[in-house]
Amino acid sequence: MVFGQVVVGPPGSGKTTYCNGMSQFLNLIGRKVAIVNLDPANDSLPYECAVNIEELVKLSDVMVEHSLGPNGGLVYCMDYIEKNIDWLEAKLEPLLKDHYLLFDFPGQVELFFLHSNAKSVIMKLIKKLNLRLTAVHLVDAHLCSDPGKYVSALLLSLSTMLHLELPHINVLSKIDLIESYGRLAFNLDFYTDVEDLSYLQHHLDQDPRSAKYRKLTKELCEVIDNFGLVSFTTLDIQDKESVGNLVKLIDKSNGYIFAGIEASAVEFSKIAIGPNDWDYYRYPCFLVICIFWIHLPFTSWLTLQNFITCTCTL
């Protein structure tokens, strides 16, 4: 199995900087990393990429040849990549033995919540090359300073999660700069946990532009709340501890942390739920009891309770 990340997000959210910093961090902890640039408009790369899609197609050439703007050109490029997926697979195959993959995608958000071509490229690679990928969706932290923009970022994050259908982590990038954007209306936890968006309504009403669309914004917030899927983690790409915490989340979501352990239920559960005070080995039969308890009728519960009491006194 080959593990990696699909790095997506709107323009300016820091995807290329993220790939550069993340690759340096992963190299420091002993992983061989290969960055795959799938942005045909990214002609100034701060990192050395193992695969560069500009060898196959360039946005500037497409725009000239087909008289397209940048948005239409990127859609065309992604369609072209999908139709020439064999080229990309051939470039990736030599890296599969011992590399961790970082896919740097374009910043056009329509590719990840509206059009199907980018998703088709990802799914074909997963199926053909047996990849285990996590989508890392970057959102600039400065959007938290504007309630209207923050709601838009939530909606974009939710749409991307539902469209890509991958293990997904939303990240507030450039968190080290958030104080320079002004005082936030709430604590940072409010923006990362996304628990009750109704508190934003008062601040939205104070903005004449947002007040005009008060009902629409309220309905959108209810949609986000009803799904209950969106939350954020924070990232300062220059802080090793911040990057390390994000890597732990990504490794758990794509299964990297399970790759090197034996297929033991106890070992898997220890990693999945984190540190705990329960001693699995001291009370091994209790795990069996818990499994069968959910299948018992309520009338059998008292008998089971007596058995548990006797067992736990051993």
Image (cartoon, rainbow, N blue to C red):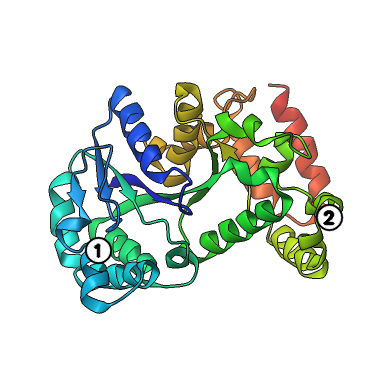
Residue at left 49%, top 34%?
Answer: 246
Task: Pick the residue in front: 220 or 279.
Answer: 220
Residue type highlighted by circle 1: Ser
Name the image quarter holding the C terminus. top right
Residue type highlighted by circle 2: Gln
Any mark on residue 74, and which? none
Pointer 2 and pointer 1: residues touching (CB < 8 Å)?
no
Residue 244, visible in the rendered structure: yes
The number of callouts visible is: 2
Residue at left 16%, top 62%?
Answer: 56
The residue tagged with tag 1: helix, strand or loop?
helix
The image shows residue 30 at horizontal and vertical percentages of: 28, 25
Residue 260, visible in the rendered structure: no
The image shows residue 23 at horizontal and vertical percentages of: 31, 34
Label 2 or label 1, whichever lies nearer to me, is 1
In three-dimensional space, the C-alpha distance between marks 2 and 1, rounded to whole angstroms, equals 43 Å
The image shows residue 34 at horizontal and vertical percentages of: 23, 41
Reading the image, the residue beneath label 2 is 201
- Please determine whether, in this image, residue 72 is positioned above or below residue 161: below
Any mark on residue 60, and which? 1
Q: Earlier in the sequence, mark 2 or mark 1?
A: 1
In the image: residue 243, left or right of residue 77:
right
